[in-house]
Image (tube, rainbow, N blue to C red):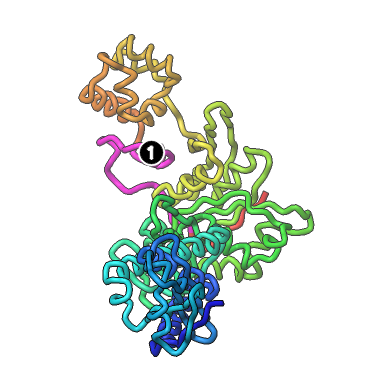
Amino acid sequence: MAKRNQKSSANKQLIIEAFAEMARQKNIDRDLLQGIIEETLSQMVNKKYGPDANFDIVVNMDKGDIEIYLIREVVEEVEDPNLQIALEEANAGEEQYEIGDEALTELNLENLSENFGRRMVIMAGQLLNQRIREVEKHNILAEYGSKVGEIIVGEVHQVRRSDVYVMHNRIELRMPRSEQIWRERYKKGETIKAILKEVRNNDSTSAQPEVIISRSDPQFLKRLFEIEVPEIYDGIIEIKGIAREPGERAKVAVFSHDDRVDAAGACIGMKGVRVHAIVRELANEHIDVVYWHPDTKRYLMNALSPAKVREVSIDEETRTATVLVPDDQVSLAIGKGGQNVRLAMKLTGYTIDLVKEGGEDIELAEFTAELGEDLYAKLAGAGVTTAKEFLLQDDEALIALGGSDLTTESLADLRRVISAEFDEEELRELYASRPAVRLPEAAAAGSSASAVVEGSASEQTT
C-alpha cells in the first residue's frame, strides 16, 4: 500500500485563498473551480512524467490544502524513472519501503518552475485562464440569455465617446449610441434602467459574450408600462403596438380584454400619474396612448390622435391610407416636423397621405403640353394622374420612369411649372404630409406647417 511522505512546507493556504478570491470575483462555483485546478495540475504532471504516470491530486478548498503525489513502484533497478523509484532513494526519508511497494513522492509547490520548468508553468497558467474564461462565458450565457427582454438595473461604470458601460452583478454590459436616448447625459456611478436587448456570442473564441442593453428600444417602453400599469401585467390590457422616436415622442396602441376597463384611461392613470412616471424615466418623452381597433380605418383615425380626422380610405394592396383632415386639424395631424403622421405610419404599418378638406387638385392631363404625350402616358400608366401626385413623387423614380423623355433639368422645370398652380400654404401642407419628400425650390421658403402637440400624453376616444 502506498505511504504518504510528510507534507511540504509550502504555504498552500495562500494559494487556496487566491483561488477562492478568484472564484468570488469571477462568480464561479467553488467546486467547479476546484475541478479546473485539478484538471490543470493533472495536465502539468502528464506533460512532465508522461501519459502513463500514476499520480494523485488533492485540492481541498475548505481546508486550504493542495497536494500533488507522484506514485511510483519501488524496484531494485530503475528502468522508467517516471513510473519507478530505486529502493535506496525511496528509503531516504522517514518512511521505509520494500521491493514492490508504491512510494508516494510529494511534488513541491514552493517552486513550481523548478519542478516543472518555467515554460510548463506558463502554459498551465494560460490553460487555467482559458478554462476560467470558458466558465465565465457559459455563466454569462446562462444568466443573461434567459433575461433577454427584461429590465436590468445597473450602475454606470464607464462613459466613452459612443458607448456607455454598465456594471450588473460584476458583469459589464454595453449600451451603444444607437440604443441610447440622444438627449440623455450619463454620469459614472449613477443608477440606470435599460432593457436587455441581446447577448452576442462568438462560438469560435473563448471571449466573453457581449451583453447589449437599450433605452431606445420600443420594448423598453412596453416593460415600463407593465411595471406602472398592473392591468397590463395581469393581461387585462394588451399593448398592440408601439412607435417611438426616443427622447421625443411615442405612440402606444392599447386594447382592453375587459369591457369594464378603459384601456387608455388605465394606462394614463388618475391625473396622468402612471404615464408621467414613464415620461420622467424617458427624459420627458411625450407619450400618446391611443386605442387599438380591429377596424383598420378606426385604428388609423385613432393613431393620428390628437388630430380629429374626417374620413379614411384604404388601399390594402399597397397598404396606403388617404386621410381627409379638416382645415383646423391639419397642423395637429402632421405634428412637429411631420412627427405625428410619421409615428402613426410606424404604428399602423400603413403609408398615410393627408388630404386637406376642401383642398383642390389638378388633373395631370392639363399639363400634357409641358410633359409631352409620351411622358404623360408613362405617368398615367404608373398611376400618377394628378398634379399633387406628380409633385410627391421622388426625383429618381420620375427620371427612371421617364427615361430619355426626362432629365434632371427638365424635371426641375416641370416641378416649378406645376407648383406655380398652387399657393404657398397648399404646397407646405402637401409636402409636410409626406415628410420624406423634399420640397422643390419653388416651395422651399418658409417654415413647415406643423405644430407642437402640448402635453406629455393624449388620449383618443372612439
Q: Is residue 229 left or right of residue 386?
A: right
State the residue at coordinates (39%, 67%): 82
The residue that label 1 is drawn on is 431
Q: Give the amino acid type for the residue marked by disc 1 in the picture.
A: Tyr
Residue under the image location 56 percent in, 42 percent down: 348
Q: Is residue 251 above or below residue 418?
A: below
Is 411 in front, or is 387? 411
> Based on the displayed image, in which of its 4 quarters is residue 110 positioned?
bottom left
The quadrant in which the N terminus is found is: bottom right
- Most prominent secondary structure in the magenta stretch? loop
Q: Is residue 128 visible?
A: no
Q: Residues within 10 Å of mark 1 (few under 14, many from 20)?
A: many
293 left or right, relative to 216: right
Q: Which residue is rendered at x = 44% and y = 54% of the image?
A: 200
Give the image location of residue 48, x and y in percent: 35, 66
Q: Residue 332 placed where, x, y %?
A: 49, 50
Find the residue positioned furthest to the top.
373
Percent x, y of residue 455: 51, 63
Q: Residue 18 location in percent, x, y?
A: 41, 82
Residue 201 higher or lower than 163, as above or below:
above
Q: Quadrant of residue 72?
A: bottom left
Q: Which residues are magenta?
A: 424-453
Decide whether residue 439 is among the magenta residues: yes
Judging from the image, what secondary structure is the residue with disc 1 in? helix
Q: Residue at x 52, y 67 (%)?
A: 152
Q: Residue furthest left?
A: 409
Q: Is residue 49 visible?
A: yes
